[in-house]
Image (cartoon, rainbow, N blue to C red):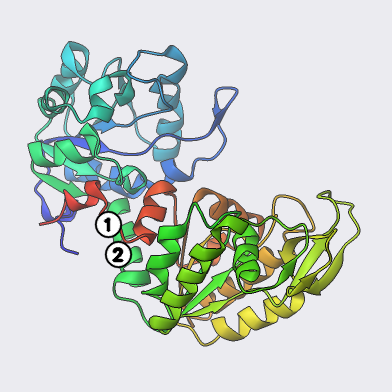
Amino acid sequence: MSFTSIRDLDLKGKKVLLRVDLNVPRQDGRVTDTTRIDRLKPTIDYLRKAGAKTLILSHFGSPDGENNAQMSLAFLTSILQERWDAPIKFAQDCIGPKAQAIADNLQNGEIALLENLRFHAGEEKNDPEFVAALAALGEIYVNDAFSTAHRAHASTEGLAHALPCAAGLLMETELTALDKALGNPDTPVAAIVGGSKISTKLNVLYHLTEKVDYLILGGGMANTFLHAGGANIGSSLCEKDMAEEAQKIITNAKKNNCEIILPIDCVTVTELSSDAEIQTVSAQSIPPNRMAIDIGPESIMHIESILKTCKTVVWNGPMGVFEIKPFDTGTNAVAKIVANLTTANSLISIAGGGDTVAALENASAAKDFTYISTAGGAFLEWLEGKTLLGVAALQK
């Protein structure tokens, strides 16, 4: 993939419209996870050092085109100043006189945060008039928000056609990592995909069977594949109406020499509670009154034997009900296997998606992965092989 980077541009004295994703988790007025903010610091530092006049664009929540004080970005000013170690000005609108006044008074190396883009209906509609109003504020457009790159909104797609454009350093890092994972990977490649339903990831699974050597399945979606293959899955979560689709994926995998890896054994309970009586049984014959809630030790050993032969791993979704201990054992074990192989330089590991990040953090393994994407929907659409419009707009 060929795209212009901010490294390729002369930014001194230029007004730069920087699209970022500051849609961060908030509780009682406080940001509970600063990951997205922290990952933007290299781009912020670069723009300041280059002498750019940086105008930050972001959305927060879903105000549906209305000015909603509960979703104002103003609360972020102090946390951005703290995390980026830089003064931040704030404009009470993202277009019009208030935004223009801030833009006109910025000095080289200074930063201003503009108000929530989604206070204007034109943002999500990619309305040409709203695009023009945003473009009037700047001279260069920089997209550093991969997590919103699957949306054709004014600030993610429209602006890339209205101004000279480039990728920020976070976007560049993300695209480089994803290219290493599926675009031009070291082989063999394994994809680990978990979660409750195959219906939400059908296209992901089809696409992966054409891209990877091993497709390792866990969570509820593995039960659907086990059921489709004739296994007795007891009272486990299963989309029995998706058995035919599962068989199609299995057929596509065989055609493409992709081996689908399903659980050999499962941890089962009669009720989903942390103190439930646990039985580990064969994944082929789960008793009628029991449900699979995690992969068992034989499955973990088998997955480890496969991962030791691989050079690249892509991960999306947990192996079981990791939110309730001790049913995070399988996910934790596999995460640590991948982390250890990564730190030993045996493989490249790329993970993404909200549940995935939480699961890997829970396993204390996230820090050792090659790259973890902060994107949810955009990461899934990339796994599906879809064109991400915000990324396509940046391509040379």
Find residue 389 and report its horizontal and vertical position in percent: 23, 48
Find residue 127 and report its horizontal and vertical position in percent: 17, 26
Q: Height in image: 289 above or below 249? A: above
Element type where label 2 sits in the image: helix
* Residue 368, image quadrant: bottom right
As drawn, is 144 to the left or to the right of 219? left
Which quarter of the rendered picture does the C terminus lie within?
bottom left
Q: Say the numbered circle drawn on residue 172.
A: 1
Q: Is residue 359 visible?
A: yes
* Residue 155, image quadrant: top left
Kind of residue at badge 1? Glu
Dot 2 crowding, Cα within 10 Å, few <14, some 14–19, many 20+: some
Residue visible at 10% across and 50% down in the picture: 9
Find residue 77 and report its horizontal and vertical position in percent: 40, 25
Find residue 222 and report its horizontal and vertical position in percent: 62, 66
Q: What's the CA distance linking mark 1 and mark 2?
A: 6 Å
Which quarter of the rendered picture does the N terminus lie within?
bottom left
Kind of residue at badge 2? Thr
Q: Say the numbered circle drawn on residue 176.
A: 2
